[in-house]
Structure formats: structure tokens, C-alpha cells
Amino acid sequence: MTDELISVKTVGVLTSGGDSPGMNAAIRAVVRTCSQAGLKIYGITHGYFGLINDEIDEMDTHSVSNIIQRGGTMLKTARSEEFRTEEGRAKAAKNLKKYDIDALITIGGDGTFTGANKFSQEHKINVVGIPATIDNDIIGTDETIGYDSALNTALEAIDKIRDTADAHERMFLVEVMGRDTGFIALETGIASGAELALLPEELTHVEDVKRQLHEMLKSQRRSSLVIVAEGDETGGAIKLAENIKDDFAQYDTRVCILGHIQRGGAPSARDRVLASRLGAAAVRVLQEGHSGVMVGVVNNAIKITPMRVAVSKKKEIDHTLIDLAKVLR
Ligand code: F6P
């Protein structure tokens, strides 16, 4: 919290990094809360790229009608190399001045917050972050916006794969998103009753995978599902399949990569409510005088975390869930 109260009059909002279902619901909540509070609100298109290139337009309560149920982001998103440079950030600050924007709300993941934090320190801009990423890897919030939707999208696909795997008595290696984190892999693994879930957070030895599968298949199992996080050290589902398929030739191994399907689609009810709460909270904490912080929900209450803390480390996976998955498979 800053020492003085910030008198915010004009707010800018942007989405940045990989999109996630519920970003639109968060934009809607920011815009409508600002309107209710008598604050001017600008939407910045294409994230930091748009901030540098002056893609800035005033919004009002009607600009965000009919978007709460839509995936993607009406403000578009991008990953901006230029914003990583001092010159890029200086151009962005100049554009904020041009529109008298005195506070910025950034919706995205750790990359978004790293940029926002630097920007806020260098140019004394008031910034509040809203965590939105399907990876769920941000500390300071129990869940990030989009995680629940992505989980359910992946699970629906995995259940369908189980049907065909079962019909053909095949082994399927299903790759889910998560470059550095295994939240989706772990929770879809438990929810789908997968035989194994391989995560970047745990050391995976191919020989160990083979041994565990042999064990399980001995006890009458005919089809099997292995969920592989894209960032698992086995190198992903395709590479793992190459390494194990000869040992399980009778199961006619197949690979399915769920990919960007997990990022699209309508946000779940839970994500819409989370995004609505966090959007409103972001405006409120700005008015209360906070800056350089991220808003989250922890134990069902709004929590404020300094951005530098939020980007300092990845959220840890719940090891009790890893143990549970092993007991139940
Ligand atoms: O951070 C979200 C995420 O979907 C990761 O799970 C994934 O590794 C990455 O983004 C994919 O990024 P891109 O859309 O640039 O391929």
C-alpha cells in the first residue's frame, strides 16, 4: 500500500499473455465497477503492444454487454517484446499520459505481472493485476481465472477418449497444457480416473512409468489412460509414446494432444463469478490507495498480494492430491 491515498479518476484495462476463459467477465466487471463509481474507463486492445501503439478507446457499461459468457478476450491479447525494453515502456507511459489514465488494470499471468511491476516502478503508474491463466500457477489466489473452465474442457475430452480406449482396449497418452506446471494434468488425472498423471513438478523416469503400467495392467486392466503435462520431463506425450510403445505392443498405443482447445470455450460458472469478484475488487483496491498489487481470492475472501511477491515464485502443486491420485488409480 502506498502512503498517500491515490485519487483515481481514469482507469485503463488490458488483457495480456495467453488468453483464458473468463477474461471477458473480468473486463466487464472492471468497466461496470468503474462506471458505477464515476471513473472514466479506457480499454487497451492487444495488451502492452496496444498500449505502446496507442490502441486505446473509451468504454462504457454498454461496451461490455453480452460478453460474460464468451471465451477469448474482447480486448484481444498479445505478447509484446517491445514492452520488455525501457524504450517500449516509456512509449506506453506517454500514451497513458495522453489520455490522462492514472491507473492501469492488467489481466493475465506471471509474464503480464512482471511487465506491470516494472512499468509501475519506472513510471510511477498505479497498477493492479488480476490473475487469469489456465495454468493456475500464480500465488496469492486459490485459483486463477480460466483454470476451472480449462479443467472441465480437458476432462470432457479425456472422458471421450476413455470410451474409445476402452472399446479398443488401447493405451492412450493424453497431453494437456502446462509448460511449467501440472495443475491441469493432476486434477484431470484424478477426475478421469487415469492410470497415471505425469507432472513437471515430479521427476519422471521412463522406466518407472513402464513398471507402474505393467503392474496395473497385470491386474486385469485392458485400457489405460496416461495424462502427460506438456512440460513433463519425458518430453510430452509423443516422445513418451515412442519410448514405451514397444513394451506395450498389445495395447496399440495412441497419442492425443488436447492443445489450445483447453484455452477456448465458454467460461464455467465458477470462472465467471471469480472474474466478476476480482474485476470489481481491482477497481476498489485502486480507489483505496493500493498499487503494485494483485487481487486474488483465498479461502473465499479477497486477498491483496504485492506483485513482486506474486511473480517471485510459482504456486506449489498440492502434494496431498498427488498422493490421492496414487491411492485411487
Ligand atoms: O500459459 C498458458 C498456456 O496455455 C500454457 O499452458 C501453454 O504452455 C502456453 O500458454 C501456450 O502458449 P501459446 O498459445 O503461445 O502457444
Image (cartoon, rainbow, N blue to C red):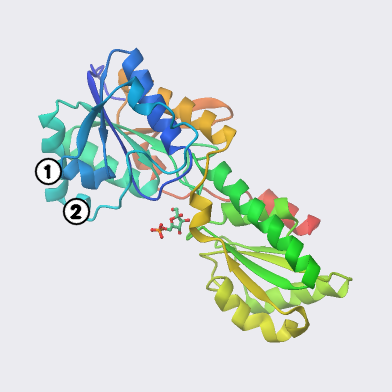
Q: Is residue 243 above or below residue 320?
A: below
Which residue is denoted by mark 2 in the rendering? 82
Disc 1 crowd, CA 10 A, few/some/many (<14, 14-19, 20+): some
Q: 62 or 227, which is in the foreground? A: 62
Distance (Cα) linking label 2 and label 1: 10 Å
Q: 2 or 84, which is in the foreground? A: 84
- Tell me which residue sits at (13%, 36%) in the image: 95
Locate ligand 1 by image quadrant: bottom left
Q: Is residue 135 above or below residue 282?
A: below
Q: Where is residue 31 in the image (x, y as percent from the top left)?
A: 34, 24
Kind of residue at badge 2: Glu
Q: 20 or 185, which is in the foreground? A: 20
- Tell me which residue sits at (15%, 40%) in the image: 54
Q: In this view, does 19 lie above or below 228?
A: above
Q: In this view, does 93 lie above or below 30?
A: below
Q: Are marks 2 and 1 in contact (CB under 8 Å)?
A: yes
Q: Is residue 225 left or right of residue 90?
A: right
Asked if ligand 1 lies within 8 A of label 2, the reply is: no
- Tell me which residue sits at (28%, 41%) in the image: 116
Which residue is denoted by mark 1 in the rendering? 91
Q: Where is residue 314 in the image (x, y as percent from the top left)?
A: 46, 50
Q: Is residue 168 left or right of residue 307?
A: right
Disc 2 crowd, CA 10 A, few/some/many (<14, 14-19, 20+): some
Name the quadrant containing residue 14.
top left
Q: Is residue 111 at least partly visible in the picture?
A: yes
Which circle's residue, 2 or 1, is located before the other in the chain? 2
Kind of residue at badge 1: Lys
